[in-house]
Amino acid sequence: MLKKIAIIACLLCGTVALHAQATATASRSRDLKIGGGFTMANADYSGRYQGGMAFFTYDFNYHVGIEGNFHFVKGGGNAGLYEKTYEIGGRYFWNFRDNKLSPYVKGMYGRGVFNFPAYVPNGPHPNLAYNLMAGGVGLDYKALPYLYVRGDFEYQHWFGFPPNGLTPTLFSVGVAYHFR
């Protein structure tokens, strides 16, 4: 009789242990991507600018994460105009089509540096820094297990830029490496 009780107890304990292993082990909630790309900006100050960008995303769970961006765009000609921004903020995203498409929205806070044209020929180019807020939308596409392609639209509002603030819009395309 004691032998039967021991066998039943082992079977019950084994069933509990097997149930503990049935939890999905391949899924994870944290996710890191680092990338870069090309940016075109429509600035209030002097028309269209173009340049580059670098970014990272770190997702805490299946819909919420943080994003950091760096943009550097220059105005055409020899005027020496450029805008440089550093931003960080939150993002909310969705996953569709077996996690290949991930549209997102983001809200960010940061700092922008604007380089003004030289007032004296061959003179110094004054640059000033301003705080800014930005909002945006975008789409990440999983091209390969470790490579994402991105399209991103961002609206920025620079506080204190004379006379009424600066409100550039930026469109970026790029690629990101997905750390697995």
Image: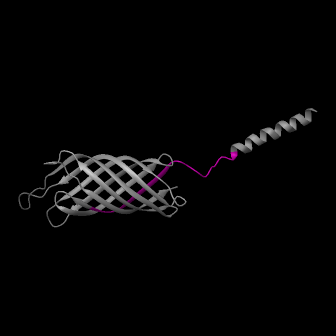
Residue at 69%, 43% in the rendered image: 20
- The colour scheme of the drawn protein is one colour
User: Left or right: 10 with respect to 168?
Assistant: right
Placement of the N terminus among the 4 image quadrants: top right
Image quadrant of residue 37? bottom left
User: Left or right: 163 with respect to 170?
Assistant: left
Asked if residue 35 is among those painted magenta in the image, a careful observer would answer: yes
Q: Which residue lies furthest to the bottom in this view?
A: 77
Q: Residue furthest left?
A: 120
Asked if residue 42 is among those painted magenta in the image, a careful observer would answer: no
- Picture coordinates of residue 30, whole percent (x, y): 51, 48
- Picture coordinates of residue 16, whole percent (x, y): 74, 40
Q: Which of 66 and 32 is in front in this view?
A: 66
Q: Tally the numbered discs.
A: 0
Q: Which residue lies furthest to the top in this view?
A: 2
Q: Is residue 81 above or below residue 135?
A: below
User: Left or right: 125 with respect to 14?
Assistant: left
Residue at 33%, 47% in the rendered image: 108
- Picture coordinates of residue 162, whole percent (x, y): 14, 48
Q: Which of 22 and 33 is in front in this view?
A: 22
- Picture coordinates of residue 156, whole percent (x, y): 27, 51
Q: Is residue 13 above or below residue 117?
A: above
Residue at 42%, 56% in the rendered image: 34
Q: Residue furthest right?
A: 1
User: Left or right: 152 with respect to 180?
Assistant: left
Q: Nearer the viewer, residue 122 or 108?
A: 108
Magenta stretch? 21-40
Image quadrant of residue 115? bottom left
Q: Nearer the viewer, residue 38 or 167?
A: 167
